[in-house]
Image: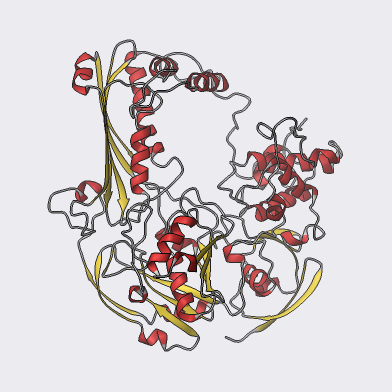
């Protein structure tokens, strides 16, 4: 592809380069200038991780062709401060703990800088408005907004510079506000995530994925792709030298589809080439012949007699069933004065961590296979990869790169095996970076669930018996399903002492995207059902929702449904704190009428139209709420 000349000013230095005309400004900054503080989180201008200044205006560099930036003045996060130093805003981010995974933070710092440049006296509401184009999946934003407020007041002289320093630690670090030691590298954009790393002579890997949810693979022809100029190798399941299977609990997932595909987006083959574009063109040359099979997309269909079998080892399509029994449920329901029964369902949820999956693999001088990736479970991955590539454990090394958000979604080894195989086959470093679309289609999700709930109660609100049955969609592979079912069973009935219960949690194979670990690890689905039942019971009995929870809550000496005797509990303190903080209006759920007295308080943010807090001149409308 012919190159063209690019001239611009970047971070106060003139830059002249020959580059490819298809590149975006983001590509040029990251690949040609190695300014990797700007990240690619979405590629669609939605997340803000790629934010830079162009002629003083904040722009999403993933949307700007590099040709459009010729002759402009570009400023990136690396240029905000003298190397080795931090701006007041970056120091404030460090002070408040505004950076967690840190992947969004360079873009967030740029957006916050833009906000204070546009209006040095911006209120909290305007700060929120101006940062609205940047997404953070870790922090909840509170510490970010707090950091911008502190920086604003330091710059205006309302707070001393010492307000940006670390708080003193008295007797213990526990309970003290301690700054994160990795924050400076994150707020300055210096920290290198897996997609930011570059090694000499490195290849780029791209993956061919299945268009079918369930199909036999009759043949794979890679000859034309392998013959292409610039292609270093093509790999399929046939290239796996050892035991081809991985998973957190059951090793049912091959590195690439072996014999058949089980979900749309499953890896079938991969190409390592001199650049991404050659690799993508080579993928189009691979010929795969499929024979489609009946698909299972609903857990109710998957457990019917005669349903298609997804894994031969599980003819009933059950990944894992966890039963828990305590007391006598028949007697408990016979004792009840009120019996409620209902069904609850939750949907599949994407983790949406801002860092798409990425990694590098190479074979070092001692023939050790090295994999660098944001794996949340590197010890387990190392042992699994040792079996897959048939090398002793001392010849397999995993390095955990900074994790740009995980939430459980990077516990599964869905691409590291492909990286290792191509590195072994080429003896060159290989890098793979998912697009956002690939991350959505190939990574594990929160388990969708269906819960059938039966609860018996006395008129005073005491629960006499519970039957809890959860079916969860495990998707095409086991991944973390067994652990999620165990945790769902353990947490199924909440922090309530129930003497008679029957709990069943079951994960089912389907041809949907695999389900895996996600924050709460099964607890959220279970608690949604349990707490909904508690509210329904409160309404049916005419009780305050807090009251019915206090009647049934664990106390010191309580026996959990997994037979654990509790020495102390804190649920009473939690309920009291929640009741006070929410300004709770006491009473049964159906006694308040159309207007509640506990809504619309000073801490409730009023709704508004996008941009309404910023005037036509770019300044904030209304009064500024100053931080003391």
Identify the colour scheme used: secondary structure
**Left or right, 387 with reference to 306:** right
- Is 464 drawn above or below residue 561 in the view shown? above
Looking at the rendered image, the quarter that the C terminus falls into is top right
x then y, percent, for residue 152: 78, 42
Pick out the residue farthest to the top: 460
Q: Give the x, y percent position of residue 339.
A: 24, 20
Residue 72 at x, y percent in the picture: 75, 70
Residue at (67% x, 47% y) in the render:
130
Locate the N terminus and report the quarter of the image it occupies.
bottom right
Residue drawn at the location 81% of the way across and 55% of the way down: 85
138 or 588, nearer to the observer: 138
Please tell me which residue lies in front, 340 or 60. Answer: 340
Numbered marks: total: 0
Image position of 384 (left or right of 131): left
Tell me where residue 591 sits by quadrant: top left
Compare residues 496 and 336 and report the one nearer the observer: 496
**Residue 387 visible here:** yes
**Residue 208 locus on image (x, y percent):** 39, 72
In the rendered image, the vertical position of residue 525 relative to residue 237, given as above or below:
above
Q: Residue at x 37, y 45 (%)?
A: 483
């Amino acid at each position: 592809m012919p190159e063209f000349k690019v001239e611009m000013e970047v971070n106060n230095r003139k830059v002249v380069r020959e580059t490819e005309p298809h590149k975006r400004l983001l590509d040029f900054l990251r690949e040609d200038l190695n300014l990797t503080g700007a990240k690619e989180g979405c590629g669609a201008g939605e997340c803000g991780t790629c934010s830079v200044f162009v002629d003083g205006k904040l722009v999403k560099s993933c949307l700007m062709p590099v040709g459009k930036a010729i002759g402009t003045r570009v400023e990136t996060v690396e240029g905000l401060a003298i190397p080795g130093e931090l701006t007041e805003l970056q120091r404030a981010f460090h002070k408040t703990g505004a950076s967690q995974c840190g992947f969004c933070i360079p873009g967030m710092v740029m957006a916050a800088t833009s906000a204070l440049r546009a209006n040095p006296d911006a209120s909290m509401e305007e700060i929120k408005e101006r940062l609205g184009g940047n997404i953070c999946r870790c922090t909840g934003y509170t510490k970010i907004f707090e950091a911008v407020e502190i920086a604003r007041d330091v710059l205006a002289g309302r707070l001393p510079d010492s307000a940006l320093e670390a708080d003193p630690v008295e007797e213990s670090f526990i309970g003290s506000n301690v700054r994160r030691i990795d924050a400076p590298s994150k707020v300055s954009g210096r920290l290198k995530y897996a997609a930011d790393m570059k090694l000499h002579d490195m290849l780029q890997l791209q993956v061919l994925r299945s268009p079918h949810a369930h199909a036999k693979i009759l043949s794979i022809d890679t000859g034309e792709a392998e013959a292409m100029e610039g292609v270093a190798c093509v790999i399929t399941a046939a290239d796996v030298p050892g035991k081809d299977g991985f998973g957190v609990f059951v090793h049912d997932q091959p590195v690439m589809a072996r014999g058949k595909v089980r979900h749309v987006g499953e890896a079938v083959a991969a190409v390592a080439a001199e650049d991404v574009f050659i690799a993508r063109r080579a993928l189009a040359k691979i010929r795969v012949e499929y024979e489609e099979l009946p698909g299972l997309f609903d857990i109710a269909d998957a457990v019917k007699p005669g349903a298609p079998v997804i894994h031969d080892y599980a003819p009933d399509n059950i990944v894992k069933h966890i039963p828990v029994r305590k007391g006598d449920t028949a007697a408990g329901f016979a004792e009840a004065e009120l019996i409620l029964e209902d069904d609850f369902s939750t949907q599949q949820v994407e983790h949406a961590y801002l860092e798409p999956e990425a990694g590098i693999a190479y074979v070092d001088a001692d023939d050790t296979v090295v994999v660098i990736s944001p794996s949340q479970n590197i010890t387990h991955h190392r042992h699994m990869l040792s079996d897959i590539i048939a090398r002793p454990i001392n010849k397999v090394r995993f390095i955990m790169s900074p994790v740009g958000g995980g939430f459980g979604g990077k516990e599964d080894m869905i691409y590291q095996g492909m990286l290792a195989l191509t590195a072994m086959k080429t003896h060159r470093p290989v890098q793979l970076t998912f697009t956002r679309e690939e991350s959505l289609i190939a990574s594990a999700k929160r388990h969708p669930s269906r819960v059938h709930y039966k609860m018996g109660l006395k008129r005073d609100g005491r629960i006499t018996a519970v039957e809890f049955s959860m079916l969860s969609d495990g998707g095409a592979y086991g991944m973390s399903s067994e652990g999620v079912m165990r945790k769902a069973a353990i947490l199924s009935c909440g922090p309530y002492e129930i003497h008679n219960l029957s709990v069943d949690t079951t994960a089912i194979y389907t041809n949907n995207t695999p389900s895996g670990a996600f924050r709460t690890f099964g607890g959220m689905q279970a608690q949604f059902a349990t707490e909904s039942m508690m509210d329904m019971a409160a309404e049916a009995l005419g009780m305050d929702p807090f009251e019915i929870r206090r009647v049934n809550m664990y106390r010191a000496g309580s026996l959990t449904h997994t037979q654990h005797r509790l020495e102390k509990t804190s649920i009473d303190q939690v309920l009291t704190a929640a009741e006070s903080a929410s300004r709770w209006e006491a009473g049964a759920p159906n006694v308040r009428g159309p207007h509640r007295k506990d809504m619309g308080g000073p801490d409730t943010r009023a709704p508004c139209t996008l941009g309404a807090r910023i005037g036509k001149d770019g300044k904030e409308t209304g009064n500024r709420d100053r931080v003391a």
